Image (spheres, rainbow, N blue to C red):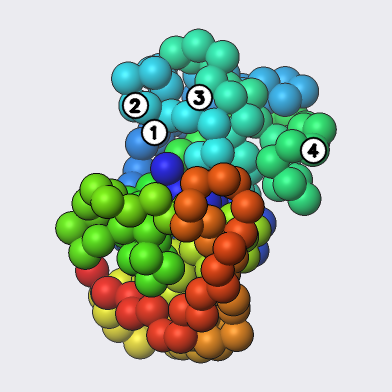
Amino acid sequence: MGFCVDRDVLAVEPMAFVDLSWASQERVRVSDAEVTGNELSSATADFSTAGVTAGMVALIGCVGHEVVRRIDANRLEVSRVRVTGEDEGVAPTAGTGLEVVIRTLGPQIERVHQRLLMAVGATGEDGDLSGRAVTVVSAGVMRELEILGVLSEAYASSAGVSGENTEIRAKAERYRAAFERRCREAWVLVDGDGDGLADRRVSLGVVGMTRV
């Protein structure tokens, strides 16, 4: 499980799930959605089979919203983007016959998560945790790094297939530079003896991202 989820990426880059239609994974697309209060419903969707979970992003008319929870196969609780995932939900604009697309950057989040864990010594190159009792204490720092790393990787991937789309290329460069700068600046506190307290500071230096 990563340090961040899709809604955290959306909070930093509101256009991510519109811009990254190629790089992100589409779970649901319907055109019969209804929004009432914080509830989004669709008679043609099967959110359960599609694996829609809390933290994913629902584009309602190309505007990103958080999936707060899946109520059942045809209904979701959604919210406008909140400051944190623990804040009270903010109802979207009500409507019927709405086009809704649900996307996730889950695979990118997992890849970046594993690279960051490797960088602080919490996992081996193959993800093996055997013999390693290192756990990350600085979850907030790692969340910030993970978000920037995901945006860097996903925009770089999209830039490779976007041709002359200068906006996508500019964002790819901006997030690459922001991720590399934050990695150089960041110190991550880790717990090496399992007592829940930080006993070591790790400097990440440069963490490589792979364009896929």
- Helix, strand, or loop for circle 1? strand
Residue 79 percent coordinates (x, y): 70, 35
Q: Position of residue 57 (x, y in %)?
A: 53, 43
First in sequence: mark 1 vs mark 2: 1
**Secondary structure found at label 4:** loop
Mark 4 neighbour density, 10 Å: few (under 14) some (14–19) many (20 or more): few
- Does label 2 or label 4 sit earlier along the sequence? 2
Task: From the viewer's perspective, tell me whether residue 153 is left or right of residue 98.
Answer: left
Does the image show residue 77?
Answer: yes
Q: CA distance from mark 2 to mark 4?
A: 26 Å
Q: CA distance from mark 1 to mark 2?
A: 7 Å
Of the two numbered discs 3 and 1 in the rendering, the one whose residue sits closer to the viewer: 1
The amino acid pointed to by label 3 is Asp
Question: Does the residue at mark 1 contact the one at mark 2 (Cβ under 8 Å)?
Answer: yes
Residue placed under numbered mark 4 in the picture: 87
Q: Which residue is mark 3?
A: 32
* Spatial CA span between label 4 and label 1: 26 Å
Of residues 201 and 145, which is closer to you in this image? Answer: 201
Q: Is residue 71 left or right of residue 135?
A: right
Of labels 2 and 4, the one closer to you: 4
